[in-house]
């Protein structure tokens, strides 16, 4: 039904844009003197109306963890790192974000300008925070999980409340989201079967029906946003297929109440030839998930000056080897 991922040459990097939850005070501290990073943060501060670098570097954890701050902070850092890599010759063959990271990926792919992306993340974070306050929810990662078993357990434990699979992270790890009592019932049933779970420190049940009010308002906002066709293929969380301008609005709205199909997206990229993944953002969570999906894939997490330099050096060497020459202009 949908488009398949275009063929990806061996060694060509796929950029991964970090999701909410990876934020940490001081992240990106070693990158602020990189010209492209400084430029992106300056642009973001103009759009968002506050000093984003100051937020990222100096905010207290409870301030940074507020959805209204966490989403812009991670988005800006992801886009900034991607810009720095591209300026140094590391060109992505495709881009994939995780949840919030899909918004960052819109800028990386060229579907939205950097300014439009930051305006979108400002609105998205506000709407999701308001929906979470209006409809409290919880999220929990179930370990040693399978898709059919989790779906059946959600049906069994919902008891008339919202409860759905929200993130397909990697083989054996599925996150559920829903009303707090329903999530507690799933956790109890999971523990009773001898399996482990891990409650996520989120402010709401993201990617569940409890985000419906945010999705409705997001549709109204996106009606006035124009999308370009991607210059770099962007793999959509909703479908695990490349996103096109024609369906971008629809899928970004659905994204708020639909599961993140990260595992399926990485698998589609691997089938297309991808063997190298570079996480732009912070924390390395996505790079670690890739390891569990495809153990043979090369993985980088660029989050400070040392990892930026190492990544650029690695791809510089790969490029020279592939061309048989180290000539440069």
Image (cartoon, rainbow, N blue to C red):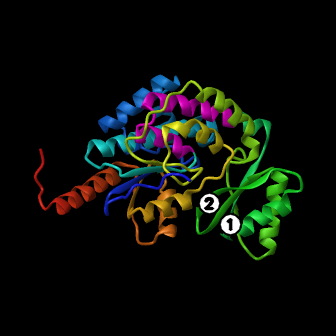
Provide the residue designation for mark 2: 168
- Mark 1 or mark 2, which has the lower sequence index? 1
Quarter of the image where the C terminus is located: top left
Give the residue at x 62% y 44%: 255
Give the residue at x 21% y 57%: 319
Q: What is the span of residues highlighted in magenta in the rendered image?
A: 100-129
140 vs 112, nearest the viewer: 112
Give the residue at x 37% y 41%: 231
Contact between marks 1 and 2 (CB within 8 A): the answer is yes
Rendering coords of residue 26 (x, y %):
47, 43
Rendering coords of residue 96 (x, y %):
47, 51
Q: Residue furthest right?
A: 159
Give the quarter of the image for residue 87. top left
Is 179 situated left or right of 54 in this image?
A: right
Rendering coords of residue 295 (x, y %):
45, 72
30 vs 129, nearest the viewer: 129
Q: CA distance from mark 1 to mark 2?
A: 8 Å
Location of residue 221 with respect to 175 vertically, above or below: above
Judged from the image, the secondary structure of the residue bearing numbered disc 1 is helix
Location of residue 223 with respect to 188 vertically, above or below: above
Judged from the image, the secondary structure of the residue bearing numbered disc 2 is strand
130 vs 217, nearest the viewer: 217
In magenta segment, residue 5 = no
Circle 1 Cα neighbour tier, 10 Å, few/some/many (<14 / 14–19 / ≥20): few
Query: In terms of secondary structure, what is the magenta stretch mainly?
Result: helix
In magenta segment, residue 122 = yes
Provide the residue designation for mark 1: 147
Is 94 situated left or right of 242 in this image?
A: left
């Amino acid at each position: 039904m949908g488009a398949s991922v275009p063929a990806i040459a061996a060694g060509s990097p796929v950029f991964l844009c970090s999701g909410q939850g990876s934020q940490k005070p001081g992240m990106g501290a070693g990158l602020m003197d990189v010209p492209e990073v400084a430029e992106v943060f300056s642009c973001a501060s103009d759009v968002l109306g506050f000093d984003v670098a100051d937020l990222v570097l100096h905010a207290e954890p409870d301030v940074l963890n507020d959805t209204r701050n966490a989403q812009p902070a991670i988005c800006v850092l992801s886009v900034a790192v991607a810009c720095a890599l591209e300026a140094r010759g590391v060109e992505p063959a495709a881009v994939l974000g995780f949840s919030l990271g899909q918004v960052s990926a819109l800028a990386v792919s060229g579907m939205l300008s950097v300014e439009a992306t930051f305006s979108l993340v400002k609105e998205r974070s506000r709407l999701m925070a308001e929906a979470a306050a209006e409809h409290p929810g919880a999220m929990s990662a179930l370990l040693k999980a399978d898709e059919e078993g989790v779906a059946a357990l959600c049906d069994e434990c919902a008891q008339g409340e919202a409860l759905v699979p929200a993130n397909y992270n990697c083989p054996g790890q599925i996150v559920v989201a829903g009303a707090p009592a329903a999530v507690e019932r799933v956790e109890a049933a999971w523990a009773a079967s001898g399996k482990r779970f891990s409650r996520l420190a989120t402010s709401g049940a993201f990617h569940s029906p409890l985000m419906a009010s945010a999705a409705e308002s997001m549709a109204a906002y996106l009606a006035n946003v124009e999308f370009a066709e991607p210059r770099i293929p962007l793999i959509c969380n909703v479908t695990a297929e490349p996103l096109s301008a024609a369906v971008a609005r629809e899928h970004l709205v659905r994204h708020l109440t639909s599961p993140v199909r990260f595992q399926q997206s990485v698998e589609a990229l691997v089938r297309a030839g991808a063997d190298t993944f570079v996480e732009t953002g912070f924390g390395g969570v996505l790079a670690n998930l890739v390891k569990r999906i495809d153990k043979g894939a090369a993985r980088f997490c660029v989050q400070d000056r040392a990892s930026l330099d190492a990544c650029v050096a690695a791809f510089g060497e790969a490029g020279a080897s592939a061309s048989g020459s180290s000539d440069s202009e």
